[in-house]
Image (spheres, rainbow, N blue to C red):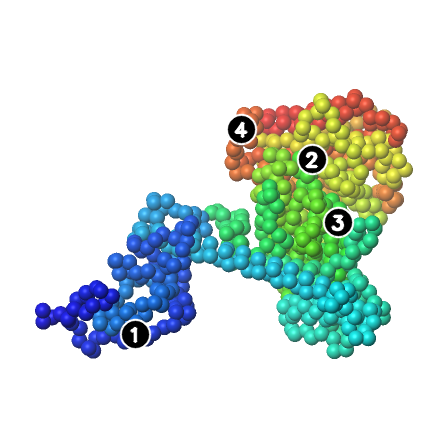
Amino acid sequence: MEDQHERVPVDGRVLVEEKVPVEQLVPVKRVPVEERFHLEERVPVEERVLVEGRIPVEENFDPSVMGRINEDGYESMSGSGNLDGGLEDEQETLVLERPAKKLKYHRHTQEQINELETCFKEWPHPDEKQRLDLSRKLNLEPRQVKFWFQNRRTQMKLERHENVMLRQENDKLRVENVAIKDAVRNPICNHCGGVAMLGNITIEENQLRVENAQLRDELSRICGLAEKFLGRPVTPLASPIALPRPSSNLELEVAGNGFGGLNSGGTPLPMGPLTRPGMMGVEKPFNSSVFVELAVTAMDELLRLAQADSPIWMTSLDGGKETLNPVEYMRTFSPCIGLKPSGFVTEASRETGMVMINSLALVETLMDGSRWAQMFPCVIAKASTTDVLSSGIGRTRHGALQLMHAELQVLSPLVPVRQVKFLRFCKQHGEGLWAVVDVSIDTALDGASINSFVNCRRLPSGCVVQDLSNGYTRVTWIEHSEYDESAVHYLYRSLLSSGLGFGALRWLATLQRQCESIAILLSSTVPCEDHPVLTQAGRRSLLQLTNRMRDNFCAGVCASTVRMWNKLHVASLGEDVKVMTRKSMNIPGEPPGVILSAATSVWMPIMHQQLFNFLRDERQRSKWDILSNGGPMQEMIHIPKGQTSSNCVSLLRPNARNQNDNTMLILQETWADASGSLIVYAPLDVASMRAVMTGGDSSFVALLPSGFAIVPDGSSGYGDDWSGKLARGSSNKGSGSLLTVAFQILVNSLPMAKLNVESVETVNSLLSCTINKIKSAVSSA
């Protein structure tokens, strides 16, 4: 027994230790229990490895099991050690009497961590085969891969739990703040229980003091918000704000940017109190600080979403389409307008491109409701500015904040119009660098909804605009929304989920096409292809008539509030056909009487560009248009609106069988871009067109438009919903398109006449006949 110590009793036990030289003993410093919780910070979470012998931390996570050392000698490096302080003396004695034991742990390389993170985004719960493949690829043991994924999932749960706790704590503080303000506003005497009277202070003076305290608190809060996005300190006004009379409304003088009371020039701009209708006609004030805080949060989110290498976006395998990574998004941002309503789905997209416009002109267009709607004619049915919180600093739009309402549409009766009410905030981030962000406010005020029947919510969306040296502007457009998918027909669900319906691609493509059209129409170097009788004034009048024709067509396809249509429910019509009617009386530009609009959407087994080329070809028009008189049409006037021949305004003359038939012309507009294409036309009499081409007023020319809207089907392949359509003649999967056909017809020249069933059946027959002719021509081509 020479190589052993004497047996020393410890709590009735007998330990036999080997002899160890004194110089090998390792002194141990006592660490207080409260400091041991921070030991886990020595190794990053993503590099910690759980090994065999640990209790799996999956669904029922217990932090007390973290940091244990197993029998194999591995240490997970993710716990806080033994937290039981009752055996400190005994533990220290044992360590001093035995040699220091080197603990085993494995530190992953950065390449291994990146590969594991990439796989975790795709499948956070890998099966055994995936773990084996990863272990061979990364030169790790399968159990190391298994426990890394367990730790990663546990970390995510802990972070979500912490966010929930912080949100609950924030809500509690808000409630306490409101209660304290109410107590200050209505002090109660402890003795009598009545209203407290402080000394000889009158009720009016006490009310003024309460309002002053509220204003100072509001001003300090707004200054803090202004400092976050202006990039410079903003101090409150040195002199007190004079209140001419007691008021219960929160009235502030703020800067032109809407935040802080001082602009760059030092001149405050007044802003009246925002109000909304209350019960019994009483106006209730909006809390402007809620708008400011929401706008700042939305702007920060938009800028982070616009970053080129942001991990929030995932690129498809072919390197094309970008999709939002929901896991990374939830980790990065907190919901700024509340949780997603039940039954809603998320739609997010991002596109970047060059536009033929400078940043200042684009910002001015976006901040003006009417000009914004004109720039996106087929996307926006109606837009208006409800309130202006701030018009900007000085004469710029930097810091402009306003409340807006819009109706967004896809040209199909099968997709409901989206009613959105949102804040629009504009900010300049540098020379020639601007950002404009939109965010819905349906749940941002007092926890109540402004619009209780919304079918769509806009999460922070908008664009980042940067001037380029060649006169163009680089635009990064982001669209992020939540909508009720149950109201959308199954034909268009793939289109909307892919972002082609309301996504960034459609907004950016429309902006590029409109800016190109404006530049060409204003250019003096464009070769004149017009008819000799068409003057410059006549050209402007003809383009104005074309714009009105296009807007009336869009209003007849979708049930927006631009036109007051009454929807008809006819049992003989299919559910995919929408028939609406309205009465026209003394309306300039419309024939008097009962106007009927019929529209439907169908799937076609042909690419949308090929279908567009067929329908716009005047030589092929006799195959589907009854107005062609069975022959080709002649193009009399051609006004280009783009670099390609497909974007133009044309005046067509049908083939006349005799001289008496030569009394009608057809005005037509066509365009196509990456998001889809449009063909709109209307028959007009020759006398009216002669007046327009000589510069006459086109607002009195009566027309009823018809046409087609064509978009891709939004599906790379077909599931059960597409099996019936494939059986009807499509052999090329993923090459289909969605065609919307719409007609507006005057069914009775008497405005007070009643609509009969024969008129509805006639229009329905016209729809069916046109669609069948197009299908027959396409299949035979």
Residue 585, percent from left and from top: 89, 35
The reply to whether dot 3 and dot 1 touch (C-beta < 8 Å) is: no
Q: Nearer the viewer, residue 47 or 437?
A: 47
Residue 303, percent from left and from top: 60, 60
Residue at 63% across, 41% down: 484
Mark 2 or 4, nearer chain start: 2
Query: What amino acid type should be assigned to the residue bearing mark 4?
Result: Ser
Q: Which residue is mark 4?
A: 723
Mark 2 or 1, nearer chain start: 1
Q: In the current view of this chain or complex, which residue is farthest to the right?
A: 586
Q: Which residue is mark 2?
A: 413
Residue 720, percent from left and from top: 53, 31
SS at badge 3? strand
Cα gap from disc 1 to disc 4, whole angstroms: 74 Å
Cα gap from disc 2 to disc 1, whole angstroms: 78 Å
Q: Nearer the viewer, residue 111 or 419?
A: 419
| Residue 447 can be seen, yes or no | yes
| Residue 738 can be seen, yes or no | no
The disc label shown at residue 383, or none: 3
Cα gap from disc 3 to disc 4, whole angstroms: 39 Å
Q: Which residue is mark 1?
A: 28
Residue at 9% across, 71% down: 2
Cα gap from disc 3 to disc 2, whole angstroms: 20 Å
SS at badge 2? loop
Mark 1 or 4, nearer chain start: 1
Mark 3 or 4, nearer chain start: 3
Q: Can you tell which of label 2 and label 1 is closer to the viewer?
A: 1
Task: Please give left or right for residue 41 compared with residue 403 in the image.
Answer: left
Cα gap from disc 3 to disc 1, whole angstroms: 73 Å
Query: What amino acid type should be assigned to the residue bearing mark 2?
Result: Pro
Query: What amino acid type should be assigned to the residue bearing mark 1?
Result: Val
Q: Which quarter shows the N terminus? A: bottom left
